[in-house]
Image (cartoon, rainbow, N blue to C red):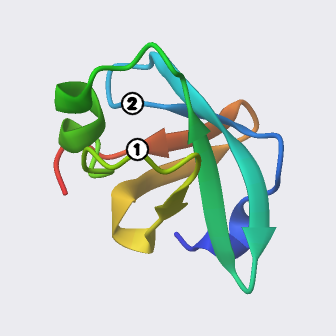
Amino acid sequence: MTNNDIDAGMDVYDRHGEEVGTVATVEDDTAYVDLDPGLTDEVRSSLGFGDTDEDTYALRDEMVDTVASDGVHLQGTH
């Protein structure tokens, strides 16, 4: 699966099917995710996004499990 299959506005889900954010934009084949502001740093880190203060996070291909009609589903560990 590649970021080429991902469009802005798609919902992003963790491995349990919980919505964790939305794809804010896709630039140069890289999708950037706007994570739910209520996520703790620990959850962000477990999703592979770290604990930085960025507004959006680059979504790496290896983080994606599937891209479906309902959104982007992330793998469990990265």
Residue 7 at x, y percent in the picture: 81, 56
Residue 56 at x, y percent in the picture: 58, 51
State the SS at label 1. strand
Kindly give the residue lying farthest to the bottom in the view shown: 28
Which numbered dot is residue 74? 1
Residue 44 at x, y percent in the picture: 30, 36
**Horizontal arrangement in the rendering, residue 69 relative to residue 15 (left or right):** right
Please name whichever residue, 41 or 13, is drawn nearer the observer in this view of the structure. 41
What residue is shown at x 19% (from left), y 57% (from top)?
Answer: 78
Please name whichever residue, 33 or 66, is drawn nearer the observer in this view of the structure. 33
Which numbered dot is residue 14? 2
What residue is shown at x 70% (from left), y 46% (from top)?
Answer: 23
- Disc 2 and disc 1 in contact, CB within 8 angstroms: yes
Residue 25 occupies quadrant: bottom right
Q: Is residue 30 above or below residue 6?
A: below
**Amino acid type of the residue tagged 1 in the rendering:** Leu
Please name whichever residue, 32 or 3, is drawn nearer the observer in this view of the structure. 32
Q: Is residue 62 above or below residue 55?
A: below
